[in-house]
Structure formats: C-alpha cells, structure tokens
Image: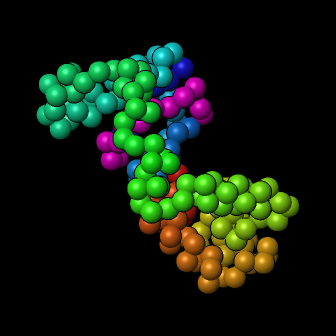
C-alpha cells in the first residue's frame, strides 16, 4: 500500500509505503501520527502514487499541461538506460581508465566487508542507533569507538551539506 501524504507545516508531498505508526516529513522533520497526515491518494501501485505526486507538484507550479504531455513513470523508466552515454564511455571520454575504476571499486568493497567499520560508518551508525542524536551525543558515541571528535564534527557538516543528513534544532537525522 502506497499513500501520497502531505506535511501540514511545510506543504511537502511524499510517498509513504505501508501503514507506519508515525511518519516524518523529509523536508522539515516534523513527526506526526500517520493517521493524522493528509492522504491525497492511497493505492497498491507505487507508479500510480508517483504519478499522482508528480502531477500535484506540477499543478503547484502551473505546469500541469506540460506534465500531462509526459509519458508515465513506467514508460520513462524503460528508457533510462538508453539515455546518455554508458559509464565506460563517459569515463573513457574523461580520460579515466574504466578498468582501473572497476578494479578500485572492487578493492574498496572488499575492504569495507572487513570486521572494522570506517570512521564515517561509525558516525552514520551513531545517527541510526541514538534516539535523538545531537552533535555532542554523536561525538561521544564516535569517540568511544576511536573516532576523533574533530573528524566527527566535520563528517556531520559534510553529511548535512551533501543532503544525506538533516539537522533540525540540534537533532540530526539520516535521510
């Protein structure tokens, strides 16, 4: 079951799968009971939910006519792999050896599968494990696991700038 829901605080629209007890707005972080969220459409088809959300966003921007001319998500998804150059062609055109990139990727994934976590993974684990992680709590968590406090603060800043983490009133959340 998929539902297009909206935030009463910031008007964000997003898709929720299933029937969670609560849901959190991806934009402003407001957490509400799922039953109290406004549900614009509920459907068993994820593509239909995506279409409705996209249509609503287009209407908000007075682009409903342009949106109506686009093919469906399912139809566009079949053409994604055809768009643009392949990864290998792009890398080669940029002067990078695609085989060297593939080998480096394999080495990186092999080293990640080891027993010890990297420093960034430790910071992300703190964000997952702590109830309402503040900067001080994340630093304490990471320091206990051998990650320097300065690195932890820099990693939090970088994760927020990259959009992988949100910060609202001093509380961090993974996106």
Report if residue 137 is visible in the image. Answer: no
- Is 107 on the left-hand or right-hand side of 97? right
Quarter of the image for residue 62 reads top left
Question: Is 112 in front, or is 125?
Answer: 112
On screen, residue 101 above or below 61 = below
Residue 51 belongs to magenta span: no
Q: Residue furthest top?
A: 44
The main secondary structure of the magenta stretch is loop
Q: Which residues are magenta?
A: 9-21
Q: Coloring scheme of the render?
A: rainbow
Where residue 81 appears, x then y in whole percent? Answer: 44, 33
In the displayed structure image, the side of residue 103 where residue 94 appears, left or right: left
12 is within the stretch colored magenta? yes
Image height check: is 99 above or below 149?
above
What residue appears at the point 21 percent right and 21 percent down from the top-left corner?
A: 68
Work out whether residue 79 or residue 151 is closer to the camera in this orientation and state it: 79
Where does the image place residue 85, in percent across and percent down from the top left? 40, 43
The quadrant of the rendering that contains the N terminus is top right
Residue at 59%, 32% in the rendered image: 20
């Amino acid at each position: 079951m998929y539902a297009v829901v909206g935030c009463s605080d910031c008007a964000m629209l997003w898709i929720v799968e299933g029937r969670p007890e609560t849901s959190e707005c991806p934009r402003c972080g407001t957490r509400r009971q799922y039953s109290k969220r406004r549900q614009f459409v509920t459907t068993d088809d994820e593509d239909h939910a995506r279409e409705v959300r996209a249509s609503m966003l287009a209407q908000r921007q007075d682009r409903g006519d342009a949106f109506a001319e686009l093919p469906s998500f399912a139809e566009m998804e079949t053409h994604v792999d055809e768009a643009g150059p392949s990864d290998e062609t792009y890398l080669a055109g940029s002067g990078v050896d695609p085989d060297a990139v593939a080998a480096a990727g394999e080495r990186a994934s092999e080293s990640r599968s080891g027993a010890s976590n990297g420093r960034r993974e430790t910071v992300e684990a703190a964000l997952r494990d702590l109830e309402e992680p503040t900067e001080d709590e994340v630093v304490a968590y990471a320091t206990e696991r051998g990650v320097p406090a300065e690195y932890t603060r820099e990693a939090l800043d970088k994760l927020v700038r990259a959009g992988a983490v949100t910060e609202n009133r001093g509380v961090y959340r993974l996106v």
